[in-house]
Image: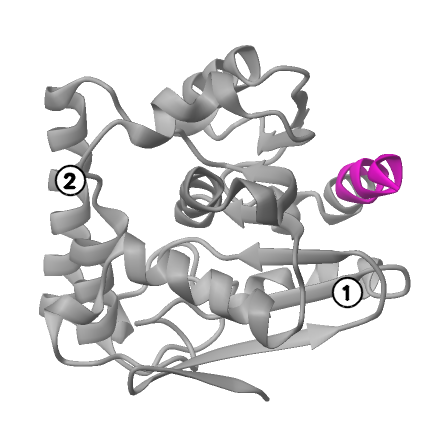
């Protein structure tokens, strides 16, 4: 169980397998446990790196709100690659992790061999829409402050164990929130192979994923039937096949 020390904040990650690398970032209030079904399917041919975002799972949950931001989280991703001696990797993520993957590409495009965006959106150019998203994030924060970890929603059981409701609340305010349109504005500039994959019933994100597919040149779009916001859990065989095919085509 390797940990990185990031200015006193321990970040948990695991690396299994050998070959071209893929870094998987989970969604909000989930953990690296969500990737357990994919890791085994890929590790025979690829180096699969999973990790827990600060405030989640086995990573630390500092009390200081300033310890939570997208910039720090992107720095955590870069530090993991450096700890593994990797110049580049396929950067993949679910929901919040997909947005962070796009943000990572904005900051470190030369480190991105490809993108896999799962059940996510590109953020907002419209200020009012962005404020609406941030109100949603604040609602998640208040929920965990009121109900604690025991108040986990429908994704409970798929995300592994958390240690701190305060960590989840601060992560919602510091990492889940959005502050500008840099990510959505970057889509036409993406030149790496990109896979966009979602459950066909993930109604809150389908429009955003269609938009990304149109704006990212050459993007491959896969919508899985009978799957919602966790397509890797709802349709694991079809999900793993789509990801494996994308990675094989890169090679």
Q: Secondary structure at mark 1?
A: strand
Span colored in magenta: 242-251
Q: Secondary structure at mark 2?
A: helix
Label 1 crowd (10 A; few <14 / some 14-19 / many >=20)? some
Q: Is residue 143 above or below residue 118?
A: below
Q: How many marks?
A: 2
Where residue 127 sits in the image (x, y, percent)?
12, 22
Q: Seen from this angle, which residue lies furthest top?
A: 214
The residue at the point 42 percent across, 27 percent down is: 205
Numbered tag placed on residue 10 in the rendering: none
Q: Quadrant of the N terminus?
A: bottom right
Label 2 crowd (10 A; few <14 / some 14-19 / many >=20)? some
The residue at the point 49 percent across, 57 percent down is: 26
The residue at the point 29 percent across, 55 percent down is: 71
Where residue 77 sits in the image (x, y, percent)?
48, 62
Of 203 and 24, which appears nearest the observer?
A: 24
Q: Quadrant of residue 164?
A: bottom left
Q: Are marks 2 and 1 in contact (CB under 8 Å)?
A: no
Residue under pointer 2 = 134
Residue under pointer 1 = 47
Q: Is residue 136 magenta?
A: no
Q: Is residue 184 above or below residue 248?
A: above
Of 153 and 73, which appears nearest the observer?
A: 73
Q: Quadrant of residue 50?
A: bottom right
Where residue 183 sits in the image (x, y, percent)?
36, 31
Report whether residue 165 is seen: yes
Q: Please tell me which of labels 2 and 1 falls first in the chain.
A: 1
Report whether residue 148 is seen: no
Residue 102 appears left or right of 38: left
The residue at the point 39 percent across, 29 percent down is: 122
């Amino acid at each position: 169980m390797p940990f990185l020390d990031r200015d006193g904040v321990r970040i948990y990650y695991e690396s299994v397998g050998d070959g071209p690398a893929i870094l998987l970032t989970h969604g909000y209030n989930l953990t690296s446990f969500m990737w357990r079904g994919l890791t085994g399917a890929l590790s025979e041919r690829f180096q699969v790196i999973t990790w827990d975002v600060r405030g989640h799972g086995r990573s630390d949950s500092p009390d200081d709100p300033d310890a939570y931001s997208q910039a720090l989280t992107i720095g955590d991703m870069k530090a993991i690659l450096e700890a593994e001696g990797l110049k580049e990797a396929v950067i993949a993520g679910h929901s919040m992790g997909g947005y962070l993957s796009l943000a990572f590409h904005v900051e470190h495009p030369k480190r991105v061999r490809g993108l896999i965006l799962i059940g996510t959106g590109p953020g907002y150019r419209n200020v009012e829409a962005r404020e609406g998203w941030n109100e949603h994030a604040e609602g998640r924060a208040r929920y965990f402050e009121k109900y604690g970890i025991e108040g986990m929603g429908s994704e409970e059981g798929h995300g592994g164990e958390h240690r701190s409701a305060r960590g989840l609340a601060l992560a919602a305010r510091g990492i889940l929130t959005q502050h500008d349109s840099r990510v959505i504005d970057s889509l036409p500039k993406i030149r790496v192979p990109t896979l966009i994959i979602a459950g066909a019933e993930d109604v809150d994100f389908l429009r955003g994923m269609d938009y990304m597919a149109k704006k990212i040149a050459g993007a491959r779009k896969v919508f899985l039937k009978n799957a919602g916001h966790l397509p890797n859990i709802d349709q694991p065989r079809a999900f793993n096949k789509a990801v494996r095919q994308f990675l094989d085509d890169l090679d």
